[in-house]
Amino acid sequence: MFKKILSYIFILFGLAELVASTSRIAMGYIAEKRDNDKWWGVEQLRHGDLASISGLAFLNKFNSDTRNNLKRVSYDGPKNTTLFIHGDSYLWKIQNGDSLFAGVSSLQYIGWNSHYHYHFDSPGKNILIIEVSERLVRDFYGTTEIIDELTDTILSQGRNSAIISSLQPDLVYNSFCFQFNRGDLFNKYINQNLQCNLFNYNFMTPMFGCKAASNYYLFNRASGDVVISADKQYLFFKQTLSLSDKGSSYSFIPDSEITLLINNFNTICEYYKKTGFKEVYLSIIPNTVTVVQPEGYNNLIPRVQKDPRLKMKIIDAYSMLKESKEDVFLHGDTHWNSTGKQKWIDMVNKVLVSM
Amino acid sequence: MTFNSLQFLVFFMVVTLWFFRLKNQKGRIWLLLIASCYFYMSFIPEYILILGGTIIVDYIAGFLIERNEGKKRMFWLVISLVANIGALAVFKYYNFFIHNIERSFSLFHLTISIPFLKMALPIGLSFHTFQAMSYTIEVYRRKQAAEKNFVVYALYVMFYPQLVAGPIERPQNVLPQLKEFRPYNWDNVKEGLARMLWGFFKKVVIADRLAMVVDRTFAHTSETSSIALFTGAVFYSFQIYCDFSGYSDIAIGAAKVMNIRLMENFNQPYLSKSIREFWSRWHISLSSWFRDYLYIPLGGNRNGTLRHKINILIVFLLSGLWHGANGTFVIWGLLHGLFVLLLTMNYEKTKEKIGSFLSAILIVFNFVLVTFLWIFFRSENLNAAWRYIKAILSFRGGSNYLGFSSRNEFIFSILVIGIMMFREKLLPGHVVRSNARFYFYTIMMVVICYYFGVFAENQFIYFQF
C-alpha cells in the first residue's frame, strides 16, 4: 500500500514538473516567487551569469560586479529629443536613464521579446537606436522572417504610429503543412526549466560548486556552456566560440548572409524612417571573445559596418571596445562592465549632441 | 528529448510508474503509445505526421497482404515499400540527388536549377522506416500474422526507447511482448536500470568527453600534427561506439524495466579480428536487417563467387547510404565492403589455426583499419576526409593541442576507455541479484556520471540517421 501511494505521488510530481517546466506562465510565476535569498530561492547570478552558471563564482577573478555605476551627463543644451532604444540585456535596467543621455527629454527602452506601440506626440526629434549583441545578430536579422513581420504586421500602422518589435526566432516556425506555436506545447527550454525547478536551489549551490571545483582543479576547465579563456582570466559563453553556431565569433559566415543582413537592416531603417523617426542607428555589441581572444574572428561586425551598401548609421561599439585600454568586459559574465557601458553611452551622447 | 536530458529522466519515471499501476494491457499500450508520441514530438512536433502516414499505410498494407494472394499480395507489399522508401527518398535523399544532378550538368557547362527541400531530416527516419518495412516483409513471407490492433501496430513502430535510434526490431520479437500482460518484476527493473546507468556513463562520461578532442581535430586538420590527428581519429572510434552503444544500452534497459526484451545491438565490436566479424558485432540490428531483407533475397552466396562479391558490395553500398545522403557515407560503406572481400576471405578459411598472439595483432590491425574508415564517416565531405588521412600519413609536426585544457583529462579519458572495455569484456551482463549491491552500484554510477560527466546537451550521433 505504501509503495502504491508513493508511486502515485511520484507520478503526480513528475507530471506537475513536466507541465510547469513547459508552461511559460508557470515558469514566470515560479521565477518571480523564487527570486530571493532564502534556501529555496533560485541562484541570483549576482556574481555574473557565467560565473554562477559554471559554479566558478568562488574564484575571485571570475566573481563579477554586475551593478551599474553610470554617471549623469552634464549637458546644458535643450532637451528636445525622444530617444528610443530597442535593446537587449547589454542595456538592461537603463529604462530610467533619461539623465544619462544628452538632450534627451524622454527615454523609451524597448527590450527584446517585447512590443511597443508608439505615437509621436511630441514636437521634438525622435531617434531610434537598435542595439543588439553580436551573438544574436544572425539569428534575429539574418533571416527573411523579420522582414515578413515588418511587412505583414508593422506596416499596417500609419505614419507617426508604429510598433517597435522583435522576433522570437524559436517561436516562429514554418511547418510544411500547418503552423502552430510549438512553444505552447513543447518548450525548447524545458531542460533548463527542469534544472531550475529540481536542482537550482540556494541550498544546493555547494554541490554544484563541488563539481565545478573538481572540473576546474582536475581538468582546468569549466562545465557545461561555459569556457575559460586562453589567458584563464575570462569566462566565455560556449556558444560564442563554436565553429558552427550562428552566435559564435568563430563560425564561418558566407558573403550571401552578410548581404542578407545588410538588406534587412536597410529595409528596417527605411521603414522606421518612414514612420517618422529622424534617424535610426544600429549598434552591434561584440561578444567578449571577439575583443579578448580575436584570433580566428569571422569579422562579422566590421563586414557589416564597413559595407558600402549599408544605409543605416552606426554607433561603432566594436572599434570603441577593441581600442579601449581599460577593462571593458566582466570576467565572469557575458556582458560588458560599467566602464564599457559608460563608454558606449558617451559615444551615443556625442552623436546626440552633434545632431 | 534526448536520453541524456532531465526531461527524459522525469518522463521515464512518470511513464514507468504509471505503466505498472495499470492493471490491463490495453491501458498500458495506450499509455506507451501516447508517451511515445510525446517523446517523438518533443523533437519537432510536425514530423509525427510523416511517421503517422507511414504507420497507416503499413498497417493497411499488412492487413491486405495477409488477405490476398499472388500478384495482389505482392502489390500491397510494393505499396508499403514505396511508401517507406519514398519517405526516405523525399526527406533524406532528395537534396543529395538534386545536388548531384546539378553537379553532373555542370561538368558539361550546363546550369540547371531545381529547388531544394528546406527542412530538417525527421529524427530517426531511417530507423523506424526500416522497422516498419520488416513488418510488411515478414507478413508477406507469412512469418508474421498481420496485426489487427492498430494501436499495437503503431506502438510497435513508435515504442519510445527504440523509436529514434534503434535497435531496429523485428515484429516476431516485439509484437507478442506488447500484447502480453507482464507483471512487475523487480529483477528486471534492477537489470534495466543498471543497464541504463551504464549507457549514461558511456554517453556522458566517455563519448561527450572524447567529443571535445574529436571536434577539435576534425575542425583544425590543417594545423594539427599527425599524432594528434591520429589520436582524434582513435577517440572518434570510441566516441561513436560509446555514443551509439550507450544509446542502445539505455533503450534496451528502459524496455527491460517494463519487461520488454529488445534485441542486442553491439557485442564488443573493437575486439573483432576482421571487418566481417566487426559487422557481426556492430549495429547488429541493422546488419542483420540487410542480411535478411537484401543480401539473402539478392542470392547471398548461392550464385557463384562473382555474384556473391557483387551482392556484398551492394549491401555495403546501401548500408553506407542508409547512414546519410553524403558521398562520405557511400565511400565508407563501399570501403567496408571492399575490405570484407579483400581481407576476410583467406582469414575465414584459417581462423581455427590462429593463436592468441596473432589474434591480438589482428584485433589491433582491424581496429586501426576501422578507425581510418571512420574518418570518412565523421568528415563533412570527401575532400576533408582525404585531407585528414593524408595529414596522418604524412607524419608531420604541428599543433599537438587536442582540445583538452589539461593532461589529466587525456589520462582520465584513456582510463575510462580502459575501464569500459574491460568491464564489457569481463562483466558483459547487467544482472544485479543483491539489492544492496544494486543500490550501491546505482549511487556510485549516479555520482560518477554527475561529477565526471560532460553535460553539453550533445545529441546522440545516430539521431541524424
Image: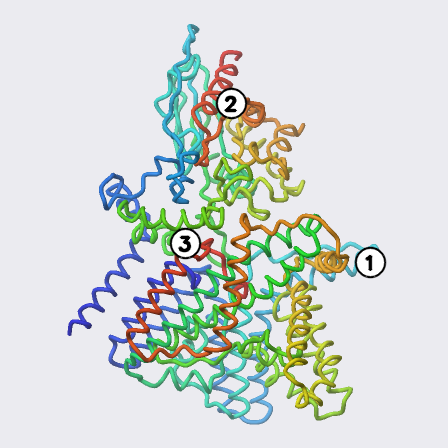
Of callouts 3 and 2, the N-terminal one = 3
The residue that disc 3 covers is A182
Instruction: Specify the farthest residue to the left.
Output: A1
Q: Position of residue B241 (x, y in %)?
A: 55, 68
Tell if the residue under mark 3 belongs to the same chain as the one under mark 1. no
Q: Where's residue B142, x and y in %?
A: 52, 93
Residue tagged 2: A326
- Using the image, determine if residue A175 lies above or below residue A101: below
Q: Which of A156 and B300 is in front in this view?
A: B300
Q: In this view, does A343 lie above or below A233?
A: above
Check the residue under mark 3 and report the chain it is in.
A
Contact check, label 3 and label 1, Cβ < 8 Å: no
Q: Nearer the viewer, residue B68 or A65?
A: A65
Of B56 and B397, nearer the camera is: B397
Q: What residue type is labelled 2?
A: Glu
Quadrant (top left, top right, bottom left, bottom right) of the N terminus of chain A? bottom left
SS for tag 2? loop
Q: At 43% from the left edge and 57% from the top edge, which residue is drawn?
A: B452
